Image (cartoon, rainbow, N blue to C red):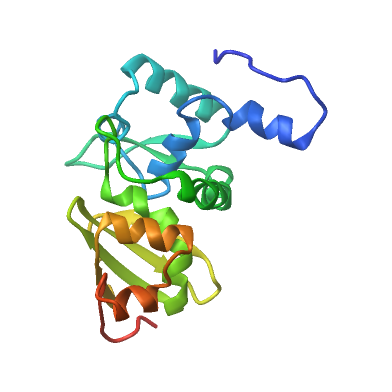
Amino acid sequence: MPRRRSYDQHCAAARALDAVGDRWTLLIVRELLAGPRRYTDLHADLPGVSTDMLAGRLKDMEAADLVTRRRLPPPASAYVYELTDRGGALLPVLRALAEWGAPALGEPRPTDAVRAHWFAIPLLRALEERGPGITHVTLDEGEFHVRIGSDGTAAYGDGPAEAADAFLRTDTATCRALASGELTLAEAVTTGRAELEETLRVP
């Protein structure tokens, strides 16, 4: 059974922190917002977390109805973790945290790990300038894609998109400037800090 952790306060914020306030929980959500992941993939993209800690957090998150575990059909026959609707509803929370934390990001420290898709959430606001569509983003560290729906919903995934209508190439320094609001996407393109190639819009 998962450990019982509670602030024992009749407060909505306290109840939320009961579920997601533990170390690593929101970063696991960040990874799963990009789509279902195997345990080994989660562990690889969460440098610093122990296997016991990750397994324990995932069990707690299953008990809190944030994630679910399912088996892929053959020939894969592997188990993946994915967010429930309740877990997916944490995207605005992570967006707010990313916007709040962006001004303090600065240059990567020597001990910092970097993954390209970690810039997806901070870039959502800048990519919303384009309106609905799918943008394939390429950094030196890798690539990911962002989908902005016609209803304003946003989602992202690791790796290339199956059908992108725009291709953005930039660097992490420009991503930080876009995330903090120092630059708009249009300004980044105009000044040569980003290259944006647009094709036909996805309906």
Residue 14: x %, y % from top left: 72, 30
Q: Is residue 117 above or below residue 154?
A: above
Residue 36 makes an appearance in the image = yes
Residue 54: x %, y % from top left: 38, 23
Image-based side of 18 in relation to 136, left or right: right
Residue 163 makes an appearance in the image = no
Q: Residue furthest bottom?
A: 200
Location of residue 191 (image quadrant): bottom left
* Quadrant of the image containing the C terminus: bottom left
Nearest the eye: 87 or 116: 116
The residue at the point 41 percent across, 63 percent down is 178
Residue 28: x %, y % from top left: 42, 35
Q: Residue furthest right?
A: 10
The residue at the point 27 percent across, 29 percent down is 111
The residue at the point 20 percent across, 41 percent down is 74
Nearest the eye: 181 or 98: 181
Image-based side of 142 in relation to 124, left or right: left
Q: Is residue 31 above or below residue 151?
A: above
Location of residue 15 (image quadrant): top right
